[in-house]
Amino acid sequence: MKIVHIASEFAPLAKVGGLSDVLLGLARATVERGHDVTVILPKYRCIDIPCTQLADYPPSHTLWRARYENVPLILVETAQNFFNRDNIYGEPDDIERFAYFSKLVAAYLHTQPPPDVIHVHDWHTALIPLLYQKTASILTIHNLAYAGACGLPMLEKIGLKPSPALQCADYYSLLQGGLTSVDQITTVSPTYAREILTPEYGGPFCHYLNKNKQKLSGILNGIDYTYWNPESDPLLPLHFNLQTIKQKGRVKELIKKNLQLNPENRILVSVIARLVSQKGPKLIEAALRKTIAEGGQFILLGALSDAETERHFLQLKEEYRHNRNVHIELTYNEELAHLTFAASDLLIVPSLFEPCGLTQMIAMRYGTVPLVRKTGGLADTVFEGRNGFSFGAATVEALHEALDRSFACWKWEPKRWQTLVRNGMSEDLSWQKPSEAYERLYASLSQSRTITSASSATPTLVAPVL
Ligand code: ADP
């Protein structure tokens, strides 16, 4: 099958969060299953790989062909300098940037033989199925909290007509445009697929999703087993697997030396996350304070995105500046992330909601026991007693109780701890099963499109011109 993904991130070339990992992992797995896959993404400034010019289309915009390992890419460069910037997101004109990108990609697709399926991801590319309806389409919701919301003036500015297909509550949403026009909506875990049918998680989309349940399903993400592999990870000083797990202890010693942490053998607890409200910053702070009070060590690697959270965590960092059991790094740091996954004993993921979550899965692959809040994909991957610890209520008390259980296990029941580590490392968290599930979906969608194509073409709601 010919499959075209269109997305705003692709790991490790343009990475903000898990969306990028999914694009790499899913695209690579489907290439390996013999499909003709292309990933189309904006040509951001941070993408620095060899490219060849594919087309000047339309004039003054450039499409580049490139490749990341075995995954073919098309990089889109716009004349307006929408993407040759320092940030992937968080620019005041994000709606315009990604709407323009989507229109450009739709226009390009119109010049090409139709693929079997187009697969778009989150609000950034959700407009494409609205503009290009020649083929079967899937929209994956990686996080419903990001709606691509705008008012009428912005809608008109990006050249779209107000339409019920884009209407969501009292505003317009590019994500809604995608939901209404695709053949199939997937989300990144079965539990999150059920959660977003409730007002609490589904918010303004809940009504539409409930009415269209038949086209919604949840497919649990995998992790890319080549990129996340403790046996060969180029960012690790030492490698290990289930049989050589003792080496993990050496990685812990080395990281403590590098970060000038106290060398005594204490439980090493970590958090690796974007510090946004979804990730439970109050619970992250509570986990840090409790770990230190109980004599453990803590690494917090948190990427910042808003000024208030930044101020708060800078204060926390200042408070613990002289404490040799704490390392707080408030940035995005790929190398430290890999080292921390490999060196830690326990990784905390106390999210208020979590569509899938990858860090708990990466942790397990690296022999680190996850402690998570039971929500979304965290509830689908971490099971207390089998491979980790979990808690239900989003409260400091519930978190503290789970931490107490995990600290006691590490300290007094090392055999049981090792069983958790072994079970985690033995889970199949790869893209094998999820990519088979997507493959089945692609096949059935493109087949039903072929059968009904003549009669069911939906009228195009907005002109696919730039
Ligand atoms: P989200 O997509 O909501 O950020 P996920 O758990 O799905 O959460 O994916 C997070 C991805 O981003 C993982 O690959 C994780 O290692 C990475 N990551 C998160 N924060 C950082 C950071 N501060 N530095 C480096 N990598 C990070």
Image (cartoon, rainbow, N blue to C red):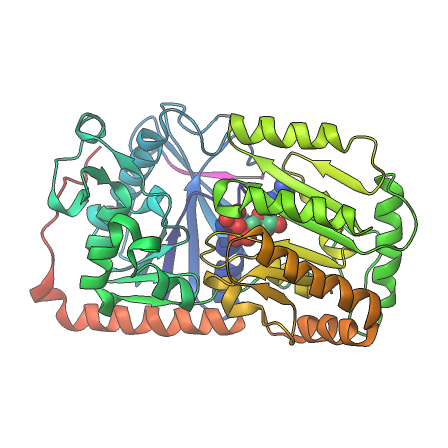
- Among the 4 quarters of the image, the one containing residue 386: bottom right
Location of residue 454 (image quadrant): bottom left
Which residue is nearer to you in this view: 247 or 61?
Answer: 247
Residue at 27% from the left image edge and 69% from the top image edge? 445
Residue 362 belongs to magenta span: no
Q: Is residue 275 left or right of residue 60?
A: right
Residue extending farthest to the right is 264
Q: Which quadrant, please, contains the C terminus?
A: top left
- 82 shown above or below 409: above
Closer-to-camera residue (419/245): 419
Q: Residue at x 35, y 66 (%)?
A: 194
Residue at far front of view: 397
Task: Answer left or right for 274 relative to 173.
Answer: right
Residue 77 position, x and y percent, is 41, 32
Q: Nearer the viewer, residue 449 or 358?
A: 358
Q: Quadrant of residue 370?
A: bottom right
Residue lying furthest left: 455
**Residue 59 pos. (x, y %):** 30, 28
**In the depicted structure, whether residue 327 falls above or below residue 388:** above
- In the rendered image, residue 213, in percent from the top left (x then y), is placed at 24, 66
Q: Answer with left or right where residue 393 lies relative to residue 341.
A: left
Q: Which residues are magenta?
A: 49-55
Q: Is residue 151 visible?
A: yes
Examine the rendering and report whether any part of residue 227 can be seen: no
In the rendered view, does 152 fall on the left or right side of 64?
A: left
336 over 401 or under it: above or below: above
Residue drawn at x 65%, y 72% as measured from the top left: 387
Q: Can you say which quadrant of the picture contains the N terminus?
A: bottom left
Q: Number of numbered discs present?
A: 0
